[in-house]
Image (tube, grey):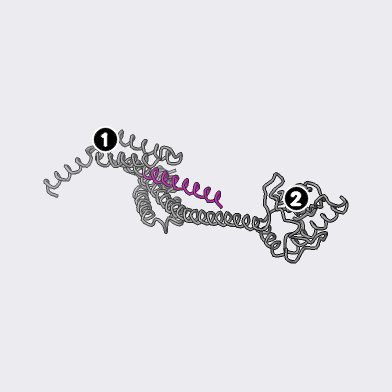
Amino acid sequence: MSKALMTAVAILTLAACASVPVSPQRVQASEQAIQDAVSAGAGKDPASAKYLELARGDLAECKQLSKSGETAHAEKMLDRSEADARLAAATARESAAKAEVKEAADILKAIQ
Amino acid sequence: MDKRLIGAFLTAACAAGCVTEGPPKELIDARATYQKVASGPAAELNPAGVADAKTALGRAEKSYEDHKYDVSRSGDFTRDEAYVAMRKAQLAESEANLVLASREKAKLDRDLEAAKLARAQRDAAAAGNKDDVAQRLANIASVKQEARGTVLTLAGNVLFATGQYKLRDDSLPALKQVVGALRDMGGKTFIVEGYTDSTGSDTVNRKLSMKRATSVQQYLIRQGIPADQIKAVGNGKDRPIASNDTPEGRAQNRRVEIIVTSNPS
């Protein structure tokens, strides 16, 4: 292997090892997912609130890890946060829809 | 024991230990959750969500395979990958449940509309029927609301010849209408009360009023009013509704009343 090539490999390896912070866009996307869950009413529905809390916790941990240079781990926490937030939003919508079903069934029962 | 042999044994034991550690709990849970979701309604209702969860689970499985012999576990994010895979499976299920709930709600809304319409029709029919019954009764008898119930008063001279208790043939069409109206009321009990004027002895009057009430009662039963819902009473000259001093008053007092009350339940 030529010297030049070895140097290039060494530089690339160093670059890969250097700490690159988590992309702010990705953090923003996760924050947006949490915001969406809140808008869907996740804070008020007990089952969804649990996932919302996890999403917030994971996001906080991601920021902490990012600061201390553990980018790869931080990104995984971001993945977890986003997955939790999306589930929180979905379960909040599901609960609301089920509540509407129950209400309609009760009205129907009363009318019949 | 040979030192080299001991070393080899320890290495083998360590390797065996590392391999048999098995997948992390997160991966086991993610597999189970995915299996449950993929074999549930989500498979049909949310295939994209299930596929997404499958891809995420595949990543977790690959991570596990890549690191399972790596004792240091450095760069092993199998637990995180599995965690995300499980959440995606749960997401697919929740989205499918939302579809199911929306469908159920739409069906309930349709049923509700149908039930409202049916009720409105029933109410309208009942109101129309009630008006109709009241109108028909008013045409052939005087109708009054009293504390004891709805009271239909039929003139005695329309129903009977003087001193007789057999129903006059020409009274039957009118009486038939009374029967129809009474039958339409449904769920009621009826008391037929016979009355006379004050002419003649009380005993005769009471007997005659009883026989006349019974004639009407029997006629109503023959026309289909249930026998256990209809009673006959002879009241003689009691409870006059007009003066017995004038021919017109006496004519009014000779009467049959049908008292309609709600069935006690």
- Residue range in magenta is A86-112
User: Mark 1, residues whose alpha carbon is within 10 Å: few (<14), some, or many (≥20)?
Assistant: some
Disc assigned to residue B249 = 2
Location of residue A94 in the rendering, given as x and y in whole percent from the top left corner: 43, 47
User: To which quarter of the image does residue B25 belong?
Assistant: top left
Q: Is residue A14 magenta?
A: no
Query: Disc 2 marks which amino acid?
Result: Gly
A74 or B253: nearer the eye?
A: B253
Residue lying farthest to the front in this orientation: B246
Measure the alpha-carbon separation of dots 1 and 2. 113 Å
Q: Residue at x 36, y 36 (%)?
A: A56
Q: Is residue B164 visible?
A: yes
Location of residue B15 in the rendering, given as x and y in whole percent from the top left corner: 40, 47
B13 to the left or right of A66: right
Marks 1,2: beta carbons within 8 A: no
* Above-or-below relation of A77 to B203: above
Judging from the image, mark 2 belongs to the subunit labelled B
Circle 1 — which element?
Answer: loop
